[in-house]
Amino acid sequence: MKIRSFIGNNLLPIAVVLMGLGFWIGFGVSGGWWMAWIPMLISVLMIVAYIMVGPMLQIQGRIEAGDMEGAKKLLDKVKYPNLLYKPIRSSYYMLRANLSTMDDNLDKAEEDLKKGLAAGMPEKEYEGTAYLQLGSIAYKKGNMKEAMEHLRKALKIGLPDKDNEATAYLQLSAITMQRRDFKSAKLYFNKAKACKPKNEQVVGQINEMSKYMARIPG
């Protein structure tokens, strides 16, 4: 694990060393060019990987380990995200959006989510999650029309699990309740309950909202 982390954090310097080694073997060893191509090829592949993938694997590892500051520092090292391989680029923007959301920087999170969607998501569930996040951001900003559009799109595309699905329905229920469309509010709320979410926060939101639903006539 430490070796992989070292290689990942020093991909470019290692590539330069390997390229230098290739030239040294080629020029310094008699008949060495037939061996020199090996470290030179590895060097070229590492440089391509550095440009197209960047430190994304290490960033994901830092996030899973709870090291958010380390993840942010690695994200800041990506100076030219447009050079990243498209699926990697979308993951980069999604991760940056998540960190911005945690810092309550909603404008930055929204901007990065849109960039991630423009880059193209590797799977439909990730696309659905991005629209769910955009809907949540619009809801927090008070833009209910946009929030509803994004949330409906998230559900239509598909979400990765029932917890996310329930979250989308709960937010739609809250929006329609504010509009005094009580019939739709109850419909979305019942769909949220039908998801049978496991996440404690989502379950708590359902329990809290059920108190208001009980007061709605009809």
Image (cartoon, rainbow, N blue to C red):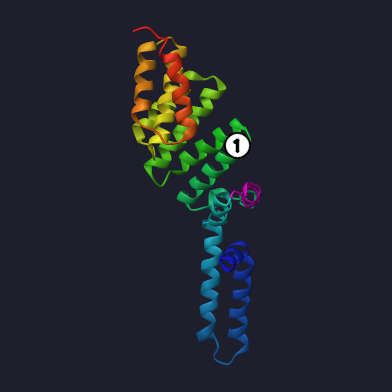
Q: Is residue 94 above or below residue 20?
A: above
Q: Is residue 72 above or below residue 117?
A: below
**Residue at the spot 56% in from the left edge and 60% down from the top edge:** 50
- Is residue 189 part of the magenta span, yes or no? no
**What is the magenta range?**
66-74
Dot 1: within a 10 Å radius of its alpha carbon, few (fewer than 14), some, or many (20 or more) residues?
few
Q: Quadrant of the N terminus?
A: bottom right
> Could you tell me what secondary structure mostly forms the magenta stretch?
helix
Q: Residue 208: horizontal and vertical position, in percent?
A: 48, 21
For label 1, the SS is: helix
Q: Nearer the viewer, residue 186 or 168?
A: 186
Q: Amino acid at mark 1?
A: Met
Q: Residue furthest top?
A: 217
Q: Nearer the viewer, residue 171 or 215?
A: 215
- Is residue 69 part of the magenta span, yes or no? yes
Q: Residue 163: horizontal and vertical position, in percent?
A: 42, 35
**Residue at the spot 54% in from the left edge and 85% down from the top edge:** 33
Q: Is residue 97 above or below residue 144?
A: below
Q: Which residue is mark 1?
A: 102
